[in-house]
Image (cartoon, rainbow, N blue to C red):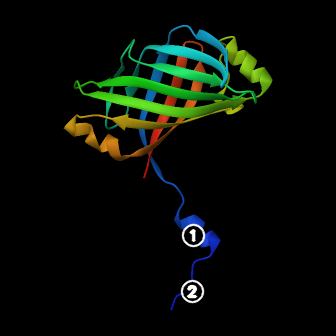
């Protein structure tokens, strides 16, 4: 009889593997400052378009079909709550939603707020995208877990999105 696996053996066997899904660049309209709400400093950032490209799908981010309900927290980090619609190059519509977190030092946060480019190694920007579509050729998206690693840019944001295997 084989002895039970140790914690180290179990952790090693359960290491996450991923596959690149796509790179998405999202352009944004100016921020709408809602203000200091009971939940924190609320901003709404409307999506103005963009594009995505990967081995299995590519297309555009529809303009005026999404926004980020950004919440500035007392600890200086930001919670994202995003809805947008992707249209693939073959015409399928995919709803992409994600929640995420961005945090950085006060100096880096100030640079980002001024619209300056900052190396993504200077801050943490991670998201958990989910997809919803009725297009049969992309129905596999309805059943995956994905992670996005982001880079804030003066005109928007770019993510490398990975399917967790």
Q: How far across and down, in percent of the image, does residue 40 sit? A: 68, 23
In the depicted structure, whether residue 80 falls above or below residue 1 = above
Name the residue furthest front. 38
Q: Nearer the viewer, residue 121 or 114?
A: 114
In 3D space, how far apart are the residues under numbered discs 2 and 1 (Cα atoms)?
13 Å
Number of numbered markers: 2
Q: Residue 84, located in which quarter of the rendered image?
A: top left
Circle 1 residues within 10 Å: few <14, some 14–19, many ≥20: few
From the viewer's perspective, is 48 left or right of 114?
left
Q: Which residue is mark 2?
A: 3
| Residue 117, x across and y down, in percent | 65, 17
**Closest to the observer: 35 or 32?**
35
Checking the image for residue 10, the label placed there is 1
Give the numbered dot on residue 142: none
Q: Earlier in the sequence, mark 2 or mark 1?
A: 2
Left or right, 17 with reference to 138: right
Front residue (pair 9, 71): 71
Residue at position x 72%, y 21% from top?
A: 109
Outermost bottom residue: 1
Query: Dot 2: few (<14), some (14–19), or many (≥20) neighbours within 10 Å?
Result: few
Seen in the image, is 134 located left or right of residue 94? left
The quarter of the picture where residue 92 lies is top left
Q: Tell me the SS state at disc 1.
A: helix
């Amino acid at each position: 009889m084989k002895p039970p696996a140790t914690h180290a053996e179990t952790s090693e066997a359960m290491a996450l593997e991923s596959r690149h899904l796509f790179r998405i660049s999202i352009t944004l309209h100016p921020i709408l400052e809602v203000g200091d709400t009971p939940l924190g400093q609320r901003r709404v950032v409307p999506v103005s378009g963009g594009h995505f490209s990967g081995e299995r799908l590519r297309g555009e981010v529809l303009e005026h079909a999404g926004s980020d309900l950004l919440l500035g927290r007392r600890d200086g980090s930001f919670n994202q709550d995003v809805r947008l619609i992707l249209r693939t190059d073959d015409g399928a519509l995919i709803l992409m939603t994600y929640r995420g977190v961005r945090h950085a030092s006060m100096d880096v946060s100030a640079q980002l707020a001024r619209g300056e480019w900052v190396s993504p190694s200077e801050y943490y920007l991670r998201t958990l995208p989910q997809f919803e579509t009725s297009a049969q050729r992309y129905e596999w998206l309805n059943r995956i877990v994905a992670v996005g690693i982001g880079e804030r840019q003066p005109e928007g944001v770019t993510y490398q999105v990975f399917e967790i295997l």
